[in-house]
Image (cartoon, rainbow, N blue to C red):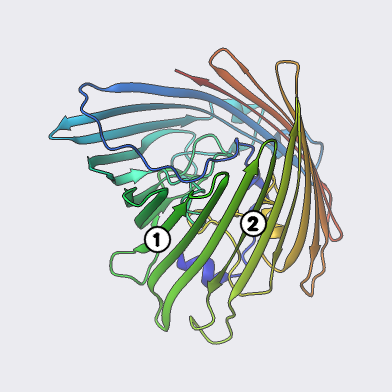
Amino acid sequence: MKKTLLLSVVASTMIMAGGSIAPVEPVVEAPAPVAAASGWDFSGQAVVYYQTLENGTGSLFDQENAKAAAGIQLSAVNKDLFAGIGAGFELSGLSSVGLENDVVSGMVQSMYPGDLTSAGITQAYLTYGIGNTSIKIGRQQLPKSLSPFAFSESWNVFKNTFEAGLIVNTDLPDTTLVYAYVTRSNDVFALADWSRINDNDDNGAVHMITAQNKSIDGLTLTGTYYLAPDFTPADDLSVIWGDAKFAVSDYAIALQGGTILAEDLAPGLADTTAFGAKLGATFGMFDTSVAYSTVDDGSVPIVNFGTGVKTPLYTQMILNQGSIKSDNDTVVLRAGAKALGGKFGVAYDMTTDNSNVSNDTTELDLTYVTTVGNVKMLAAYVLRTQDIGEDTNVVRFWARYNF
């Protein structure tokens, strides 16, 4: 909940920040208590990533419209260094590999702003488990299913991370309780660029409590509360968010909603309220869904406060976050088909802008995802139209080799 997001309020998300096409995240799962083990487990990934975006400036594949990066990420995890205390580390490196000379105009993601080749530590944490409680402290990823307003986004080369303490408890039947103490986050465009979540608090802290219950077969209920103490000199900032998912056979329904309580933060500010719903079904090799979200004209947008980019809304697509995060009604239709060794996807967004600007938008996303051996690949095309301004065309490609 970076203070700059609130104070600017109307700052627009960079359109090049588009695109989460990652698989749907699972609901909150409690990490198992740390088991007795010895030795380090090593893994990693190598990634190549290319994107070009044209909205009235030259041709789609012109060098000035394109960005890219090649990256390598190495991870090491030891679940029992001593006395049940574990540790994990992740080293990430990103490079332009010389593509800026002839192919692209810059980096889609780097470690430091302006660097063409650099590396840094993106995760470094300690773990401990006792009974039905697990603890994780340090630099780590946070999933959207657990933390809908401060989560690691998967659309770029590598995920952004947070400096946080995380406690998960499963003592209550069919219930998971989570507490997070989050202090800093890095920039999704520059992973070594860290800043405090809450500038006014002495420790820069934001507190989060999540409770999830699965007592009814097929039904998952999740509630989350955030508190940012002294977010402004006038008051604390609170966020209340809820999510309900029900699945039976090949059908699923989901509801979400909540509010950002900003009215008392400064004169002239108003609370922001949002709701969403989603219906989905699977028919053999095909799947389809329809999603709806509405956000009122409150002062603080519905957005990932760790990055200022994506939203937790069911209607989030590749590029539409700037249109759906505030004062709008949005409908998204999706369909997918498993074929030719992968999965084809199509999604269409219709957003009605309820502000005085009244800039209605549409977005068409065409995607293909496939896995060949240890390599996962994505190809995507996006066409975005708006009542005011130029249409936007995007081509995105990435390949990830996991080892």
Q: Amino acid at mark 2?
A: Leu
Which residue appears at 69% of the width and 71% of the height?
A: 296
Q: Which residue is mark 1?
A: 208
Identify which residue, 329 or 20, lies in the foreground. Answer: 329
Residue 256 in sight in this render: yes
Q: Amino acid at mark 1?
A: Met
Query: What is the count of numbered marks?
Result: 2
Residue 80 position (above or below residue 290): above
Spatial CA distance of label 1 from label 2 is 21 Å
Instruction: Name the quadrant containing residue 92.
Output: top left
Residue that sits furthest to the left in the current view: 83
Residue that sits furthest to the top in the current view: 373
Residue 194 in sight in this render: no
Mark carried by residue 113: none
Q: Which residue is mark 2?
A: 255
Could you tell whether 248 is left or right of 45 in the image? right
Callout 1 crowding tier (Cα within 10 Å): few <14, some 14–19, many ≥20: many
Residue that sits furthest to the bottom in the current view: 267
Which residue appears at 58% of the width and 59% of the height?
A: 303
Identify which residue, 133 or 393, lies in the foreground. Answer: 133
Tell me the quarter of the image containing the C terminus: top left
Which residue appears at 25% of the width and 28% of the height?
A: 78
Q: Secondary structure at mark 2?
A: strand
Could you tell whether 186 is left or right of 64 in the image? left
The percent position of residue 362, horizontal first and vertical second, equals 82, 52
Residue that sits furthest to the front in the current view: 216
Callout 2 crowding tier (Cα within 10 Å): few <14, some 14–19, many ≥20: some
Which residue appears at 43% of the width and 42% of the height?
A: 29
